Image (cartoon, grey):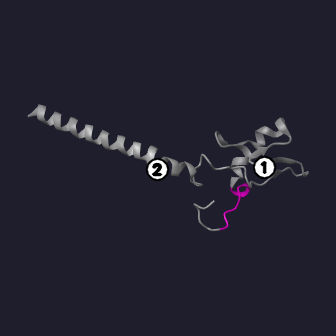
Amino acid sequence: MRRRAIARLAALFALLFAVLALQQIRLAVIEGPRLAQSPLNPRRANAAEGRGEIVASDGTVLAKSVGARRVYPVGALCVHAVGYLSARYGESGLEASFDRFLAPQNESGDPLAQ
């Protein structure tokens, strides 16, 4: 009786593993190209595009977007306060604190639209 229960449990786990493997293959092979091209894919998102400038009180530009890159004209002078914006590492400093104001505004009202 005990061996039969263990065999059933092993068969159940093998079946569940097969279902997971098939789902992963479907996701990678069939859905993969569509997901890779989706504008909602965070790997394709360009956070710097359309992002506002960070300007000091004297008018000096501390951070601005140039094309698809974020540029920090003053260099290391205020790096700890201004922080950074990176697709790989995220954001820190003023870039993170004021992201809501710096990011391009979504005019459509749809939170998923870009």
What residue is at 21 percent from the left and 37 percent from the top? 11
What residue is at 65 percent from the left and 43 percent from the top? 87
Q: Quadrant of the C terminus?
A: bottom right
Image disc number at residue 31: 2
> Image quadrant of residue 76?
top right
Image disc number at residue 13: none
Amino acid under label 1? Ser
Mark 1 touches mark 2? (CB < 8 Å): no
Q: Nearer the viewer, residue 105 or 32?
A: 32
Q: Position of residue 91 (x, y in %)?
A: 68, 44
Q: Is residue 104 magenta?
A: yes
What residue is at 79 percent from the left and 38 percent from the top? 79
Please state the extent of the stretch shown in magenta in the rendering: 100-107
What residue is at 74 percent from the left and 48 percent from the top? 68
Query: Which element carries disc 2, helix, strand or loop?
Result: helix
Kindly report the secondary structure that dominates the magenta region of the rendered protein.
loop
In the image, residue 82 sits, relative to residue 106, either above or below, namely above
Horizontally, residue 22 falls left or right of residue 41, namely: left
Q: Which circle, 1 or 2, is nearer the viewer? A: 2
Indicate which disc, 1 or 2, sits on the residue closer to the N terminus.
2
> Image quadrant of residue 17?
top left
Considering every residue shown, the one lying at the far left of the view is 1
Horizontally, residue 89 falls left or right of residue 3, namely: right
Image disc number at residue 65: 1
Horizontally, residue 38 falls left or right of residue 56, namely: left
Considering every residue shown, the one lying at the far top of the view is 3
Q: Position of residue 8 (x, y in %)?
A: 17, 38
In the image, residue 15 sits, relative to residue 111, either above or below, namely above
